[in-house]
Image: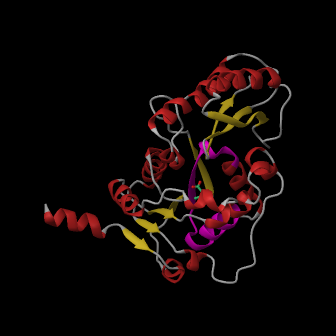
């Protein structure tokens, strides 16, 4: 038993410095799951997909870095859950080969003055509500790609806008990286898994299931005018208006996230709400035949 534990432990490598990650001789191919920690079942799903793709060759890397520059509100950063010890255990359980968990000083030595911005897709949806957020995401993901040089990187569809922006980043900055998108993992009541759910109490978690109910009603309505879909989604969420405040409900073109009047192409219904000070997002794809 002891021997097994020892073998199990040493198989997970943790790297915290730029110097070590840069010099690390990865078994190829490298598969990267970028995270900000506070790992939950949604992350497990991404990691499991990485493991399935890896099979018995390559290196499955999980980066755990709570990237301060993607938080436009310092209070939001302060209350973001930090669970590094449990995150390590989760990675061990899921058979991750290597964790990259740098400090802020490693990632952003003082002074730093170069960042990466996307100027089109990032203007929509959450972009207009969280100024600078996607610049922070693009900058840190670019750094992770440069340091880890993955062949494949795995992202969740819950952060659909982030996924679309990263796909654009791959094209525009010529990274030879394949992006794999994974369906959103949900609680039994439909609530999309998110590290931010930790900030909700049990009643709020239950009430938050209305977000997915609204999305499902929108996609199943058969309605083709976005304004009707939005009205429907609003009417469902507003039943919980004591607790939940809508930040936006939109129907957008899936290829560029621009607002759509009529669903005449693959679309996305996207919702952002506040429960107290916690902001939650979710979305659903609307197919067009
Ligand atoms: O989705 C996240 O957890 C973060 O935005 C990411 C991609 C790890 C960049 O910090």
**Magenta: main secondary structure:** helix
- Residue 240 in the image: state x and y as whole percent: 61, 26
- Residue at horizontal 74 percent and vertical 25 percent from the top: 288
Determine if the magenta segment contains residue 146.
yes
- Return the residue found at the far front: 242
- Return the residue found at the far right: 261
- Residue 185 in the image: state x and y as whole percent: 50, 39
- Residue 269 in the image: state x and y as whole percent: 71, 32
For residue 172, which quarter of the picture? bottom right
Q: Is residue 109 left or right of residue 44?
A: right
- Residue at horizontal 44 percent and vertical 30 percent from the top: 188
51 or 234, which is in the foreground?
234
37 or 30, which is in the foreground?
37
Q: Is residue 56 left or right of residue 262?
A: left
Q: Is residue 70 left or right of residue 252?
A: left
Ligand 1 shown in quarter:
bottom right
Range drawn in magenta: 138-161
- Residue at horizontal 47 percent and vertical 60 percent from the top: 82
Determine if the magenta segment contains residue 191.
no
Q: Name the image quarter holding the N terminus.
A: bottom left
- Residue 16 in the image: state x and y as whole percent: 47, 76
For residue 224, which quarter of the picture? top right
Question: Relative to residue 287, is residue 111 depicted above or below?
Answer: below
For residue 92, which quarter of the picture? bottom left
């Amino acid at each position: 038993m002891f021997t097994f534990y020892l073998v199990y432990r040493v198989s997970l490598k943790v790297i915290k410095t730029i110097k070590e990650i840069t010099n690390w001789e990865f078994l190829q191919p490298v598969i990267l799951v970028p995270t900000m920690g506070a790992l939950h079942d949604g992350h497990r799903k991404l990691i499991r997909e990485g493991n399935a793709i890896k099979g018995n060759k390559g290196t499955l890397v999980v980066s755990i870095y709570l990237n301060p520059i993607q938080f436009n509100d310092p209070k939001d950063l302060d209350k973001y859950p930090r669970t590094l010890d449990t995150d390590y255990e989760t990675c061990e359980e899921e058979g991750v080969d290597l964790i990259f968990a740098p400090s802020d000083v490693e990632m952003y030595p003082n002074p730093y003055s170069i960042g990466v911005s996307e100027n089109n897709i990032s203007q929509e949806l959450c972009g207009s509500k969280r100024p600078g957020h996607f610049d922070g995401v693009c900058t840190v993901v670019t750094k992770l790609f440069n340091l880890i040089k993955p062949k494949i990187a795995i992202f969740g569809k819950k952060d659909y806008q982030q996924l679309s922006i990263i796909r654009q980043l791959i094209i525009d900055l010529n990274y030879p990286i394949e992006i794999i998108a994974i369906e959103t993992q949900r609680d039994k009541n439909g609530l999309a898994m998110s590290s931010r759910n930790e900030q909700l109490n049990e009643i709020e978690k239950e009430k938050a299931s209305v977000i997915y109910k609204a999305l499902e009603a929108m996609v199943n309505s058969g309605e083709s005018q976005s304004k009707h879909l939005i009205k429907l989604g609003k009417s469902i969420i507003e039943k919980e208006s004591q607790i939940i405040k809508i930040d936006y409900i939109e129907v957008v073109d899936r290829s560029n996230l621009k607002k759509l009047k009529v669903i005449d192409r693959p679309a996305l219904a996207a919702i952002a709400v506040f429960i107290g000070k916690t902001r939650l997002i979710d979305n659903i794809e609307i197919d067009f035949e």
